[in-house]
Every structure is written in structure tokens, then in C-alpha cells.
Image (tube, rainbow, N blue to C red):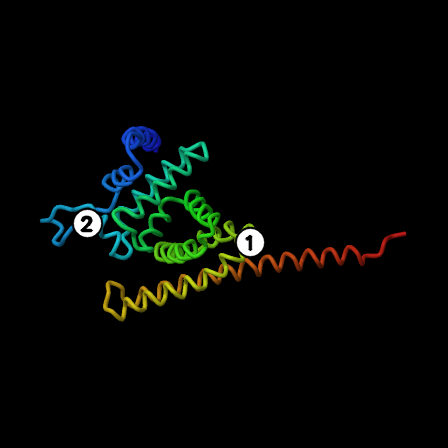
Amino acid sequence: KDNKSQTIPEALFWLNRILKPHSLQMRAKLLLITYGPLISVSPASTSIPYIGWWDLTDTFFINEGLEELGFALYMLYGQTKSPEDKSNVILLMEEIMKTPQNWLFENMASLLFFAGDDITYQYFYTKMSTENYSEVAQKLVYLTLIEHKLTKKTKIVYKMIEKLCSSSEHKHKLMNELPIAFCEAITDIDGAIELEDERDITELHEIIAAQSDLMKNSFLSNFDMSSQESKQSLTSNDSQTTPKEE
């Protein structure tokens, strides 16, 4: 444990030194080269792995490699102190997700999941501040799918949605877009299955299960809030109706 805690600051030091002189585009490429997914052509024992950045644009759910890349972004974001530095890391993450071209939503969501809640929330909040509610909803849908695939839960995404909807304006607009985004994602996956694409029927079951779990979390949360409000109301009424002792 002590060795690991000493290794992370050292790794951050060298990572910053390597990235600092370069442009945003080059930083994105360097991070992908260093931490991105390595793909082996079968049989793996006789082939040399290659960096799978093109695979991120057309292959669904690349998990291996994105965990390390996400952790690198998590470390970079965690060390930032000024809002400008935080924005720069978010811009770097955005650049990574369109290198060499725009990634599939599922792979974007995987990177966001592994990069951690803080940078992901700020990424979404920035998008919402510029009225990109549709894009946020799309990525939240796939983030829900990824969390459900990896953990069989959707609590992280639900809490993030709650946080993003802290203002009534954001809540109204995002809640309007989320059902549309879920419908579009389900339709896309169903269409890919019919075309005998890489997806199979389990993918369709997975996203429906993810949506159901997210709705369940929402229902339970609202039920708990209603129960608490009812208890408070009853307590208040009891205190008002209790006769005063003379």
C-alpha cells in the first residue's frame, strides 16, 4: 500500500512532464498510446497487440484498457486546483473521445465511468450549461448501461442525475430528453441485432434492465422522500392538536 501511494505521485509527475509541452491533440494521442486498449488478433500468443483506437470508433464495449486510461484522467483531474486546470483536463478527455474519430457512445461511457464521478459530473454540467441536454441524455443512457453491465446497479448514475437536476430548469429539460435517449438507444441496439451486427439479444436485455433499475431507484427515492414528508406532516399535526396543559 505504501509503495502504491508513493508510485502515484511519481507517475503523475512524469505524466505531467510528458504531456506539458504538447498540444491538446497530441496529449490525447499520447495518453491513448500509453494507457489505451491493446487489441490482439487471435491467436494472441502469436500476434503483436496493436493500439485499438480505431476499434473505439466501431467496436462495442471495449473494457480492457479504458480502465487504465480512465484512471489516468482521474489522477490528472484530482491534482488540479484551479477551475482553468479542471477545464483543461475535461477538454483533454473530450479530445481523447474523438481520437482518431468520435468513439461509440458505449466506449465514451466506459471511459467516463472509469474516470470517476467528479470529472464526469463536471463534464455533464458543462454540457448542460451550453444547452446540450440531448447529448448529456444520450451519454447518461450509455453510462447507465455500462454501470449496469459492470455492477448490475445504477446507483452511481442515479445520484449523478439527481445532482445534475439540482436546479428546476436543468431538471425539466434533462428529464424531457432522457426518455427519448433511452428509446433511441434501444432502437439502435435492436436495429444492430437485426443487421447481425456485433451485438446480440443480451445487449437489448441489458439496456432494458438498466433502464428498469434506474426507474426503480427513482421510485424508491421518491417514495422515501414522500414517506419522510408524511411523517413530518403527521408530527407537525400532532404537535398542533396536542392540548396544552393548564
Left or right: residue 198 compared with residue 118? left
Q: Mark 2: which amino acid? A: Ile
Q: Mark 1: which amino acid? A: Glu
Mark before the other along the chain sequence, 2 or 1? 2
User: Marks 2 and 1, Cα distance to the nearest angstrom?
Assistant: 44 Å
Closest to the observer, 171 or 37: 171
Left or right: residue 207 compared with residue 214? left
Category of crowding for the residue at label 1, using alpha-carbon neighbours closer than 10 angstroms: few (below 14), some (14–19), many (at least 20): few
Q: Position of residue 84 (x, y in %)?
A: 43, 34
Closest to the observer, 85 or 60: 85
Left or right: residue 5 compared with residue 165? left
170 over 216 or under it: above or below: above
17 over 53 or under it: above or below: above
Left or right: residue 71 compared with residue 124? left
Which residue sits furthest bottom? 194
Q: Position of residue 176 (x, y in %)?
A: 49, 61
State if disc 1 and disc 2 touch (CB < 8 Å). no
Q: Secondary structure at mark 1?
A: helix
Name the residue beneath numbered marker 2: 39
**Residue under the point 43% across and 57% down:** 134
Residue 153 can be seen in this image? no
Name the residue beneath numbered marker 1: 169
Classify residue 189 by image quadrant.
bottom left
Q: Position of residue 163 (x, y in %)?
A: 51, 49
Q: Position of residue 36 (x, y in %)?
A: 25, 44
**Residue under the point 55% across and 53% down:** 169
**Residue under the point 33% across and 65% down:** 188
**Mark 2 vs mark 1: in front:** 1
